[in-house]
Image: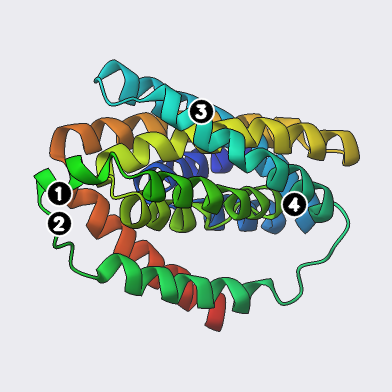
Amino acid sequence: MLEILLLVVTGVATGFLNTMAGGGSMLSVPIMIFLGVPGTIANGTNRIAILPQNIAAVWAFYRKGVANFSLSLSLAACTIPGTLIGAWLATRIPNDNFNVVLAVIMVVVLIVMALPDTKSVQDRADASLSRQRMVAGHVCMLAIGFWGGFIHIGVGFLLMPVLNRVMQLDLVTTNAHKVFIVLCYTVVALIVFSSQLELIWAYGIALGVGTWTGAWLAANMQIKHGIGPIKVTLNVVIVAFIIKLLFF
């Protein structure tokens, strides 16, 4: 019973962080490993919890009028080939050098997100018509799908620069697309993992109860308070993430 309670509480924090910025799975996966779940199984079981988190966030953004499902769906569709390959490999390949590689990626993301945004609101509206920008964003989704399928941890830090910097979407809209994209590819990844591994559904569902709550709170906070909390959360989590990967 204490294990289930711990997972629910962890899920709330995970859902909140994942919806605000990313990195929440750096809480949920280690907690399951701490409870004795093998790493590969924990990686797969974590996908069970990701589903309700993103369903809650998508619904919250939609109810507040922050949604463009046609664009979200086309971006999500581009992640599917990579997701299939990444999830399949994740059931077979150990991740011995994973932490150092991910830490390097996080340093790059932190630098990119810290760069000043010089575009005005009108510039963003004009940029929305750029075919080149749209194509670049969709191409990037192929690689993001692979990462999301393979390990998922930190995928928000990859999605946000693509949506915010490459595609020039504001941060609230970025997160609305992000949660929809993750929802779609997670369905595919979960099918692969569940067909190849014995996932611990009780743990996944317990985490999912928490992630639903955390994601709902985070989505509504973003809509009410704008991009301020997102930027603060994003930078704090990325720095903590890098320290965790390199030194612990």
Q: Which mark is residue 73?
A: 3
Q: Nearer the viewer, mark 1 or mark 4?
A: 1
Question: Which quadrant, please, contains the C terminus?
Answer: bottom right
Kind of residue at badge 3 = Leu
Kind of residue at badge 1 = Asp
Kind of residue at badge 2 = Lys
Residue 170, image x, y percentages: 24, 45
Q: Which mark is residue 202?
A: none
Label 1 with label 2: CB-CB less than 8 Å: yes
**Circle 2 residue:** 119
> Residue at position x 45%, y 36% from top?
179
| Label 2 Cα neighbours within 10 Å, binned few <14 / some 14-19 / many ≥20 | few
Q: Which mark is residue 123?
A: 1
**Seen in the image, is 146 located left or right of residue 118?**
right
**Seen in the image, is 106 located left or right of residue 245?**
left
Q: Nearer the viewer, mark 2 or mark 4?
A: 2
Label 2 with label 4: CB-CB less than 8 Å: no
Helix, strand or loop at mark 4: helix
Residue 181, image x, y percentages: 51, 36
Kind of residue at badge 4 = Gly
* Mark before the other along the chain sequence, 1 or 3: 3
| Label 1 Cα neighbours within 10 Å, binned few <14 / some 14-19 / many ≥20 | few
